[in-house]
Amino acid sequence: MPADEKENMPDQYDKVSLENFIKYSKDMFAYWTENDFAASFRKMLTLEQFRNEEMQALYQQYLVAGYVKDLFVGMGMKDVDNKADMFYSVMFFYYSLYDGAEEKGQIKDRFENVIDDIALKLNN
């Protein structure tokens, strides 16, 4: 996965496969939910984005703005805005489910199944 914005490394965005993107997405979900520091940071940014412009910028950088749309363009997909919206909707929905769940493993499994299903739809 590219480590920087598309403007700084455009060639890297054309080399990402859908399979690698899906694996990366699952790894990021695990990171933002299972890593104590990252989960606490994500929750703090979620709250603080409404109180402080600097925190809102960090929230956008780490959790929203991302580069999913650019990756989808690099993969040759069409209708990238809607596909990126669909992807982000699922990510945020499952973050919320995970945070409130007693059976966190079940939520992670459900998330991974949904992401696999979305991968099939992204190529259409």
Image (tube, rainbow, N blue to C red):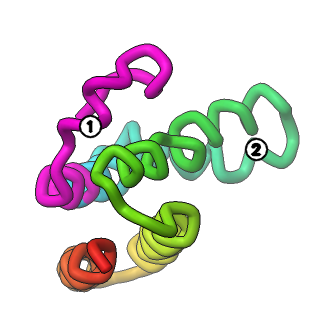
Q: Nearer the viewer, mark 1 or mark 2?
A: 1
Q: Which residue is mark 1?
A: 14
On screen, residue 108 versus residue 78, left or right, reads left
Return the residue nearer the eye: 90 or 5: 5
Q: In the rendered view, tell whether residue 86 sits above or below residue 25.
A: below
Q: Residue placed at 75% from the left, 38% from the top?
A: 56
- Locate the N terminus by quadrant: top left
Q: Which residue is mark 2?
A: 49
Which range of residues does the magenta coloring cover? 1-25
Callout 2 secondary element? loop
- Residue 110 in percent (x, y) is at 25, 85
Quarter of the rendering containing residue 122: bottom left
On screen, residue 118 versus residue 54, left or right, reads left
Q: Residue furthest top?
A: 8
Q: Which residue type does callout 1 highlight?
A: Asp
Q: In the rendered view, tell whether residue 117 sits above or below residue 61.
A: below
